[in-house]
Amino acid sequence: MSRIKAYNKKEVTQKAMNLFWKNGYNTTSMQMLEKEMGINKYSIYDSFGSKEGLLEESIKCYAQKLNSIIEKLKKSSRGIVAIKQYFFDFKDLSVENDIAKGCFVTNTANELMDSCNNAIKILLTDCTNKVRTTFAQKLLETGQYSFEEIEEMADYLIVAMAGFSSATKMFSAKQVDNYLQQIFKNI
């Protein structure tokens, strides 16, 4: 007879996600995860298979959080203004206790893309592609651009998003706002 888990898997995944997001995968030890999640390593292995399995679930958890602002962007009829608002919404999503953590996907890709398993690579790529595709759809809806321009601008925006994500961790709010204004001067 299997034991009943005394913890909520979704809640402990969110705690792990926040720890990975703040510290990175390699810096986060099993002891740190045990303390943050409030469960022992045997429970972590039982529920997630491995630290890497826990990272996969953490990325999925982050994708759900990100999806809330993606859906807001999709529903907006404000074109480029809506895309710009997405950047502001993202900035709000990435701050915890006045500490900007950047983008969990970007942080993880920067740290692990060359060394992680295919499942993690796919999750990271899918998340990025979803944002890029949404940018392209919003640009298409404006009716102002050719297909080629939309593709170029969507690429520009997703790369700018990666830079913006890093900037939120390093620079003052004023500097980040100036950077954001410059991003949209080119569109």
Image (cartoon, rainbow, N blue to C red):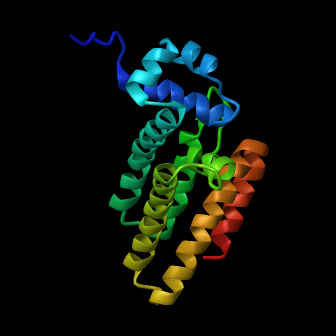
Q: Position of residue 112 (x, y in %)?
A: 64, 48
Task: Say which residue appears at 74% left-offset and 57% top-offset.
Answer: 178
Task: Say which residue appears at 76% left-offset and 48% top-offset.
Answer: 174
Looking at the image, residue 70 lies above or below residue 133: above
Residue 12 image-quadrant placement: top left
Task: Say which residue appears at 28% left-offset and 10% top-offset.
Answer: 3
Residue 1 image-quadrant placement: top left
Task: Say which residue appears at 57% left-offset and 73% top-offset.
Answer: 155
Side of 182 relative to 13 (left or right): right
Q: Residue furthest front?
A: 1
Q: Position of residue 121 (x, y in %)?
A: 52, 55
Q: Nearer the viewer, residue 72 or 126?
A: 126
Side of 43 relative to 112 (left or right): left
Q: Position of residue 53 (x, y in %)?
A: 47, 36
- Quadrant position of the C terminus in the picture: bottom right
Looking at the image, residue 95 lies above or below residue 39: below
Looking at the image, residue 149 lies above or below residue 155: below
